[in-house]
Image (cartoon, rainbow, N blue to C red):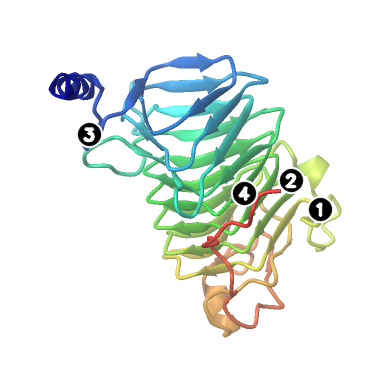
Amino acid sequence: MKITQKIFTLILFLLLPLNASGMPGAEIGNMVISRDTTWSGRIIIKGVVVVGRGVTLSISPGSTIAFHRLDQNNDGVGDGEIRVLGRLLARGSAAKPITFCSAESNPRPRDWSYVLLFTSGQKSVIDYCRFQYAFSGLQVHFSTATVTNCFFVNNNEGLRFGRAKLKIDHNEFRDNNIGIRFTRMEGPAEIKFNNISHNHVGIFLVPSGQNIVNFFDPGHSGRPWNKGHLEIVNNNIYANDDYNLKLGAKQKWNLKISGNWWGGDELKIIRAGIFDHQRDPDLGKALITPLAAAKIIGAGIKKYAPPRP
């Protein structure tokens, strides 16, 4: 009887779909999730998964969500994505993080597109997750979310967001082309207690042309516009290859970005790692003083999560 059970178990194991590393996992193609769903274990995505409006996708601690590389439009970016119109609850833990990654045997950045929170009506929670080998690990637009204790590594962009009510605290951004990209410069958003290092560009801030009248100071008074829209404080932003901070085209307004640690205390060296008015007179100024006196202790991923209420 025991031998029969073992044979039956082996057959089931062999029938499970395999990813590139040989581990079993449930494979999902293009689909719409229309009711509350929980994913656990290893999920392999081959296409686009849409979480419908009013629907919650929960992902259990320790799960791995892997994306096959499919590039049907030949734009150099894998098509795989999770598009959340409802709510995403991806709560890992320090001991059991949730991983979003490539399913390829030789993974590289852009193997898959992103996890996208778009016009979602409920607050999403992303905690203790790892995003790797994506075009953008996570994108948040017209949505509310908290992103905490996450590791963004080996992506084209770690995190991109536009108009959003967003909390980005205690994360690690490393070895991405761009660590954090803010594309519409509308908030409110906070970026606090993160380690952002060894990317090509640490933080890239660029507005769209749609929001200049409504969200910027039309009088060009020189006052920083971002009070109430964007707060960047108590971060360690250092050792990024090109720039620790870069202002993009049309970013003509001054930004208050004080209270961060930039890898040292020599202002001339710090400013050499910032692309703003000093390099392009058409841009605004990054107002980075006063500086943090030393490297921010306690920034980055918390080793132990506090108990949930």
* Pointer 4 or 2: first along the chain: 2
Q: Nearer the viewer, mark 4 or mark 2?
A: 2
User: Which residue is depicted at the point 45% across and 29% down?
Assistant: 81
Q: Nearer the viewer, mark 3 or mark 4?
A: 3
Residue pointed to by mark 2: 187
Residue pointed to by mark 4: 206
Residue 247: where, in percent of width, then height? 60, 57
Query: In which quarter of the view is residue 284 placed?
Result: bottom right
Q: Horizontal placement of 186 versus 277: left or right?
A: right
**Spatial CA span between label 4 and label 2:** 13 Å
The circle on residue 115 is: none
The secondary structure type at the circle numbered 1 is: loop
Check contact, mark 2 vs mark 1: CB within 8 A.
yes
The secondary structure type at the circle numbered 3 is: loop
On screen, residue 57 above or below 230: above
On screen, residue 13 above or below 126: above
On screen, residue 223 above or below 139: below
Residue pointed to by mark 3: 20
**Spatial CA span between label 2 and label 1:** 7 Å
The circle on residue 228 is: 1
Q: Nearer the viewer, mark 1 or mark 4?
A: 1
**Spatial CA span between label 3 and label 4:** 37 Å
Give the amino acid type for the residue marked by disc 4 in the picture. Val
